[in-house]
Amino acid sequence: MLREVEKNLDKIGKDLDEQEESLNREQERLWSEAIRNMEENLSLSGVSSSELDPSLWSPYGDWREKVRSSFNSSLDVFLGDMRIAINRVKWDKINANNTNSSHKNDYNNGYSSWNSQPPPKGKYDNEKPNFSDKNFSPNDKNGWGGEGKYTPNYTPKYIEEIKDKIEFYKERLLKTSDEREKQKYQEMISNLEKELETLRNQSDNQESRNPKPTTEQVNDAKSKLNEVKDSGKKEDLVNALNETRNTTKNSSDQDLKKEREEVEKKLGEVDKEELRKMIKSEVEEELKKFGIRSSDLSPENKQRLDKLNEINIEPAEYQSIRTEILNESAVKSLDKLISEVERTIKLGDKKKIKSKVEELRRFIEDGSNEYAQNAYSKKKGIVNSLLEKAKNKSSQQNKDGNFFRPNNPAMWLSGVAVIGVVVGAILIVRSRRRDKKMATK
């Protein structure tokens, strides 16, 4: 008997050793795969690990060592932080290159679209990134240029980073079968989505500070542009374009926009490089506003975007490039909004439906943005149908919710009717049982 027990114990011990060895092999495979993928990410991004903040993997001496010391969700969190850090360094290097290439002859407009500071640190699983310490006031050079001109190179960049991390955690959520890990990922996604909503609200508040210009402001801008239209002086042309930029951008007056285009052409005749820089800056700014990256563009428009780095192009072609790129960007941005509204309708979350519908309405009702209006005209049927669908969904939810309110007579009548049916059924059953007993006697 004792020998049999010892044999069983030996067998159990061997099985446990084999399982432990198998788990160790699987963990080693996961670590090796994570390291290989991260090295590939670094290589494709043109980033060296020495350019990353070493506090990411502290107290370990190397990020690979940190990988091999992390398990399950803590490994996923670290890999997510690494991805964000690599992306940040990559864009900072691109921004620096663009700034250096155009800084020498920049036209002092106070809003370079590639001049942002590194984003605040914060690991989303245990602390919120401190976005609130930035003061988005007209005097804050991180978000604003002079004269209250907002530069969309602070908030949009971090919005994209948060979106990336949300997608990363959603992928991990789908892959794991561990309920505790699922709960942790859901909490992190929820915190990030709240942060994202806060940043979007900040962005919306900034846009609301640029109201539609008055008739007097529009006429004044037209006058300034008309005065320099025939001028051959570069300084006068640049100053007029800079001074009327915000008014033209926030106005739906097509005559004003045409006046500006004429002055742009004149600047192109005097100095093509100056016009190139001006249009390139505008394109970069609008791409960020639409939330579109160069990689999202069609092959044709990627080539057009590259052409904005060439100086031997006619002024009209620069303008045509801008139109083609931004028209496509607006359509893609609208497509994203449409998809988000459709998704929230399927989820049935009334609060999210309202938020996404408001975002969609802001886009299609922006009469000052010709590219947004062009996109809306192409998708008008789809958008209007979707808005009606969202309205019906919300109305149905309100109807269902109102039915169950305590002071709803219909609910009380329905309740009384149900109770009556139940009581009636009970009485019938009791009566039949009584009759059956009487018959047996």
Image: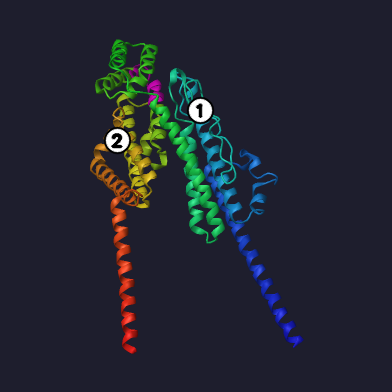
Q: Is residue 72 above or below residue 422?
A: above
Between 210 and 145, the one lying in front of the other is 210
Residue 196: mark:
none
Q: Which x, y percent locates residue 282?
A: 39, 27
Q: Tell me the amino acid under the disc marked 1.
A: Asn
Q: Quadrant of residue 426?
A: bottom left
Above or below: residue 330 compared with residue 420:
above
Mark 1 nearby-residue class (10 Å; few <14, some 14–19, many ≥20): some
Quadrant of the frame with the N terminus: bottom right
- Provide the residue span drawn in magenta: 267-279
Relative to 166, 356 lies left or right: left
On the image, the x and y values in percent for residue 239 come to 39, 14
Give the total number of marks visible in the rendering: 2
Asked which secondary structure carries label 2, the reply is: helix
Distance from disc 1 to disc 2, alpha carbons, whole Å, reads: 30 Å
Q: In this image, 340 relative to 97: left or right?
A: left
Under circle 1, the secondary element is loop
User: For mark 2, what is the residue?
Assistant: 364
Residue 97 vs 180, above or below: the answer is above
Residue 271 is covered by the magenta coloring: yes
Could you tell me if the residues under marks 1 and 2 are in contact, i.e. CB atoms within 8 Å?
Answer: no
Q: Residue at x 24, y 20 (%)?
A: 255
Magenta highlight on residue 125: no
**Colouring used for the render:** rainbow
Disc 2 residue type (three-letter): Ile
Q: Position of residue 49 (x, y in %)?
A: 62, 42
User: In terms of secondary structure, what is the magenta stretch mainly?
Assistant: helix
Q: Is there any visible trace of residue 309 in the rendered image?
A: no
Q: Which residue is mark 1?
A: 115
Q: Residue at x 31, y 15 (%)?
A: 217
Mark 2 surroundings within 10 Å by alpha-carbon count, few (fewer than 14), some (14 through 19), many (20 or more): some
Q: Position of residue 349 (x, y in %)?
A: 38, 48
